[in-house]
Amino acid sequence: MNYAVKRFIQLIPILFGITFLSFLLMYMAGSDAVTEMYTNRGVEVAQEIIDEKKAALGLNLPFFQQYINWLWGMLHGNMGISYVTGEDVLLAFMKKLPATLLLTALSIALTVMISLPCGILAAVRHDKIADIVLRFGSFLGNAMPNFFVGMLLMEFLGIQLGVLPVISSGTDFRSAIMPTLTLAIAMSAKYLRQVRSAVLDELNKDYVLGAKSRGISAQVILWRNVMKASMLTIMTLLALSIGSLLGGTAIIESIFMWDGVGKLAVDAINMRDYPIIQAYVMWMAIIYVLVNLVADLLYHHLDPRIRLGVNAK
Amino acid sequence: MSQAITPTIRVQNVRQNRLQRKLWFFGGLAILLILASFFSDYLCPYDPYLQDMSLTKAAPSAEHLLGTDRYGRDMLSRVIAGSKTSIFSTLLLVGFIAVFGSIIGIICAWAGKWVDTLLMRMSDMFLAFPGLVFALAVAAVLGGGVHNAIFALAAISWPKYARLARSQTLALQSAAFMQAAKMAGSGTCKIIRKHVLPNIAGPILVTAMLDIGTMMMELAGLSFLGLGAKPPIPEWGSMMSDTRNLLPTQPWVTLSPGFAIFFSVMIFNLLGDTVRDYLDPKNRK
């Protein structure tokens, strides 16, 4: 548990960094935020009113003063109001977050279901037909941007075959299939390779040769020893690939009209609704950092060499 | 399950020769692609901007191999013209982050102490953001355009190169030949130029080559969201997003820029893989 505490303490400067960068972005854009707000609401106002509003929002204060005020507000759950709708940003964001988390979780589950068995198969049948086919498939998948995959799926599953709705009608299961599939295909292509090379590395170790020469069956070696050892690497890599998934959801959600935070952010970008963008960037980074933390802690808990301190001098 | 631990010299020669041929082949394809994008103005059969309202949404035919879009512009010409924006911006971006990141990395390793701590904590901060999310926000704040999209992606990608260059340089510093160079009285500049750069160039080159495909896709992704090249400038990502609602009726219009991205990324990925294998000491004579 000592390690967990240490990791938490290491997290503090990173969290500060995240809030600082998020604020800085907003600050860079914020010079005409008030004008933007009135323009978005479709009202023409005098310069005096803009100046007054700026003073009221504390936009005339020095940079660090503004940052501290903003941070303080944020810690109290106040992330400002949307320039467009006038809604509380945190509330608007939290309302859409479950849909994105659902999509992310489904995509990860599907990715693991595709790439884990395929990756292991490819490693075991190294350089045989199955391996070559899977490698080729993952290679093709790696060269396709996710919006292209999404469009292809739309064209074939939605339009040619007509089995799935092209545009989400809400956040129900049927609408989730295509965005999930899109994200999972792009992610599996990358992850399959990583699983394959992790298992292959383990299979090439001396102890596997030793076990084989002692007549232990290949199945037992694979499932009892090799999988146990390579699982750690596989899990860490999965946690790392969640970062690209979180970024990918923005594009995919707006293609399929999936009503999550990614679409919220893209819409906000088009409307120049900076507080929403800021909330999106900050929370995505925090989620990402926390996922990595959990993965790291799990890694330390599962690896007996680290947990029992065998490696530590 | 296990392979021969030390391949014989003969096997290695054969492998090396095969890699060399692959390198020439994919390198040639990549150069062809880059040249094609450079001379795209001369390769387009029609003016990519020319609207012909009598010929809108035409199906592929002998005159217009990929058909026309809703303004009657020839799609093949637009795809070819799009290569200039897509491929050139990507190469510029990757070149920039590789050089900038490496400089930061070398400075970190060389200066050590607080400079190292400061710069590395900064790169930690950037790495804490999930890839595209931060680029999205930077591009949004800067307000779109190809240059801003390049800047946004550069802002999130330089730390990878900084870390790589730093760890490589640190590993070198304890090498005997470096100690020898120092004792022989070589100055910092000379050591970096003569000993550090040649030794860290390989891994950085490989990372950069493998990054070209990813960056091309991310740049196209930003353009797809309207944060990169703006229509009517032909760019593959924005072309796909622009013609998105033609998918049910004219799928070739929407999908052809996608295939262009797909094939270009594939060529650069194949080249990257080959360069990596070629520079891998395991495959060396």
Image (cartoon, rainbow, N blue to C red):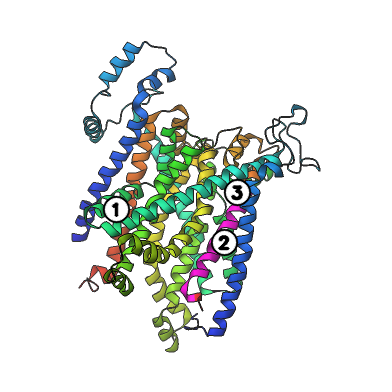
| Residue that badge 3 annotates | B261
Magenta part of the protein: which range? B260-282
Q: Amino acid at mark 3?
A: Ile
Asked which secondary structure carries label 1, the reply is helix
Q: Position of residue A40 (x, y in %)?
A: 43, 20
Residues at marks 2 and 3, CA–CA distance in whole angstroms: 15 Å
Q: Is residue A56 above or below residue B81?
A: above
The answer as to whether the residues below labels 2 and 3 share one chain is yes
| Residue that badge 2 annotates | B271
Asked which secondary structure carries label 3, the reply is helix
In the rendered structure, the answer to whether residue A192 lies left or right of residue B104 reads: right
* Closer to us: B180 or A60: B180
Residue neighbourhood size for the residue with mark 3, other residues' Cα within 10 Å, grouped as few (<14), some (14–19), many (≥20)? many
First in residue order: circle 2 vs circle 3: 3
Q: Chain of mark 1?
A: B
- Please tell me in which quadrant of the rendered image residue B266 appears: bottom right
In the rendered structure, the answer to whether residue A71 lies left or right of residue A169 reads: left
* Closer to us: A149 or B111: B111
Q: Which mark is residue A99?
A: none
Q: Is label 2 in contact with label 3 (beta carbons under 8 Å)?
A: no
In the rendered structure, the answer to whether residue B74 lies left or right of residue A67 reads: right
Q: Amino acid at mark 1?
A: Met
Residue neighbourhood size for the residue with mark 2, other residues' Cα within 10 Å, grouped as few (<14), some (14–19), many (≥20)? many
Front position among marks 2 and 3: 2
| Residue that badge 1 annotates | B120
Q: Chain of mark 3?
A: B
Front position among marks 3 and 1: 1
* Closer to us: A216 or A256: A256
Q: Amino acid at mark 2?
A: Leu
Q: Is residue A65 magenta?
A: no
Residue at coordinates 59% horizontally, 70% vertically from top-left?
B20
First in residue order: circle 3 vs circle 1: 1
